[in-house]
Amino acid sequence: MILLAAGKKSAEVTDWAARIGWLVGLALFVALVYWLMREGWKWRATLQSDLPELPTAPTDAGPAKLNMSGRYHGSTTAGQWLDRIVAHGLGTRSRAELTLTDAGLDVVRPGATDFFVPAERLRGARLDKGIAGKVLTEGGLLVVTWEHGDKLLDSGFRSDRAAEHNDWVDTLNHMIDKTEGAR
């Protein structure tokens, strides 16, 4: 019985050139796919080049109404949760610190472009389950709708403490209602 087990072994590889050729071919295919994805990202940014530069926070925005730390998951065209906006770094996912003041919403993103949404540009806030590249449970994502140039954008955020989302939606929508009533 021991002799039978010792006698069985796999066949030796005799065609190393073919195996190496397949590995090199596979590596080149993967590199091509990544290059095409990068070119697609750059092309999308070119198509969205009509978006103006992102506003920066004023030096004195006033006292903070709400603060939140969490993640920024990206921006899309409002109402089209798969149409990602990549121009000006808005497609880059990152950590985020949000501060809401009477002046607007300040989004500070370490390692990515910070931006500021003036209060008069805010259009709405809601809880949702997804935005391009990120799908969560129902109500797991804070989505803020705002106007940038002549386009409406949805930006998705997820707090480190999900219980904060409802306060953000209520406060933002109340603030937007007051701003629209003053116009």
Image (tube, rainbow, N blue to C red):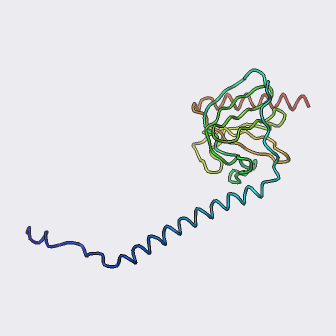
Q: Residue at x 69, y 40 (%)?
A: 143
Q: In the picture shown, does residue 98 fall above or below 33?
A: above
**Quarter of the image where the N terminus is located:** bottom left
Quadrant position of residue 117: top right
Q: Residue at x 71, y 51 (%)?
A: 86
**Quarter of the image where the C terminus is located:** top right
- The residue closer to the viewer here, 170 or 75, is 75
Extreme residue toward the top, this view? 63
**Residue 174 on image: x %, y %:** 78, 28
**Residue 73 on image: x %, y %:** 64, 44
User: Can residue 24 be seen at all in this image of the molecule?
Assistant: yes
- The residue closer to the viewer here, 75 or 10, is 10
**Residue 156 on image: x %, y %:** 67, 42
- The residue closer to the viewer here, 17 or 34, is 17
Q: Residue at x 62, y 31 (%)?
A: 69
Q: In the picture shown, does residue 35 fall above or below 115?
A: below
Q: In the picture shown, does residue 16 fall above or below 41?
A: below
Image mark count: 0
**Residue 153 on image: x %, y %:** 76, 45
Q: Is residue 10 left or right of residue 50?
A: left
Q: Is residue 115 left or right of residue 36?
A: right
User: Can residue 139 be seen at all in this image of the molecule?
Assistant: no
Extreme residue toward the right, this view? 183
